[in-house]
Amino acid sequence: MPRVKRGVNAKKNKKKVLKAAKGFRAGRGALYRIAAEAVDRANAYAFIHRKTKKREIRALWIARINAAARINGITYSRLISGLLKANVALDRKVLADMAVKDPAGFARTASVAKTALAA
């Protein structure tokens, strides 16, 4: 049975881990064993926070919409309900952008929601 030499692959793996740990402080960026743990943990946090980021952005949109809606004399939940009844297909991202960049357009959208609720 031939001998298996694994030095090339081991070096390749170590280089890959140390490259991923570039910029980490002290031994976490220089020592393979410590860097491997640090990179694994960093990847775990990155995975978790990619999911959390979506929740936080949606919460920000809702806060902006609510603030603009209250300026126009309606609450967030009633605004969303009124838009659904009026068959206005605007998502929260677009509504939040309107609230910041186009207050007049948002005011018209809020009035549409109010009339749909009154009807």
Image (tube, rainbow, N blue to C red):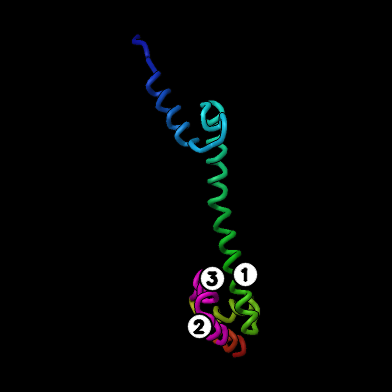
Q: Which residue is mark 1?
A: 63
Mark 1 or mark 3: whose residue is earlier in sequence: 1
Q: Which residue is mark 2?
A: 105
Identified at 57% across, 44% down, the residue is 45
Mark 3 neighbour class, 10 Å CA radius: few under 14, some 14 to 19, many 20 or more: some
Q: Nearer the viewer, residue 83 or 61?
A: 61
Identified at 51% across, 29% down, the residue is 30
Q: CA distance from mark 2 to mark 1?
A: 18 Å
Q: Which residue is mark 3?
A: 92
Please tell me whether mark 3 or mark 2 is closer to you in this view: 2
Q: Which mark is residue 82?
A: none
Amino acid type of disc 3? Arg
Amino acid type of disc 2? Gly
Please tell me whether mark 1 or mark 3 is closer to you in this view: 1
Q: Secondary structure at mark 2?
A: helix
- Compared across the picture, whether 117 is left or right of 90 comes to right
State which region is magenta.
Answer: 90-111
The quadrant where residue 99 appears: bottom right
Mark 1 and mark 2 in contact (Cβ < 8 Å)?
Answer: no
Instruction: From the image, give the main secondary structure of the stretch colored magenta.
Output: helix
In the displayed structure, 15 sits above or below 96; it is above
Horizontal and vertical percent for residue 97?
Answer: 51, 72
